Image (cartoon, rainbow, N blue to C red):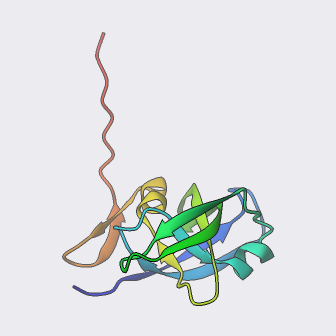
Amino acid sequence: MGITTALLRVREHRKAEKFADVEFLVDSGAIYSVVPGRVLDELNIEPYREMSFSLADGTTLKRKVSSAYFEFEGEGGPAPVVYGEEGDSPLLGATTLGSIGLVLNPFTRTLHPMRLLMAGLKS
């Protein structure tokens, strides 16, 4: 299995003029995305809560969480964002991928538009 990275633009909200381009490690098994805290501070993105996260070795970490607007190749969407601390790598998780409408192809390790389904009843 290979490692996939992607360059995304991060903003406070969709219409914000200030942005940062961040190279992320894509991890479709992660729920939230991680952005370096210094980048979020520069974008005036303030945390609104703190959450606990478990690592594979059983260690528990607390991190600040907020929300941001992510863009990839002209498509974008809002998603929760974890304030990365020293030693944390930028990570693109499933919630952000879904918000933008992307899916990771596990065979080619590339991002593609997801097939969006909508269930409903006809009257």
Q: Using the image as rendered, state which of residue 36 and residue 77 is in the foreground.
A: 36
Q: Residue at x 76, y 61 (%)?
A: 16
Q: Visible in this render: residue 30? A: yes
- The C terminus lies in quadrant: top left
Name which residue lies at 46% across and 58% down.
95
The residue furthest top is 123
In front of the other: 23 or 113: 23
* Residue sitting at x 64%, y 82%: 85
Q: Position of residue 114 (x, y in %)?
A: 33, 56
Q: Is residue 92 left or right of residue 4?
A: right
Residue at position x 59%, y 81% in the image:
22
The tally of labels here is: 0
The quadrant of the picture occupied by the N terminus is: bottom left
The picture places residue 120, in percent across and down from the top left corner, at 31, 24
Determine whether 31 is above or below 89 in the image: above
**86 or 42: nearer the viewer:** 86
The picture quadrant where one finds residue 28 is bottom left
Q: Is residue 111 above or below residue 86?
A: above
Using the image, determine if residue 103 lies above or below residue 3. Answer: above
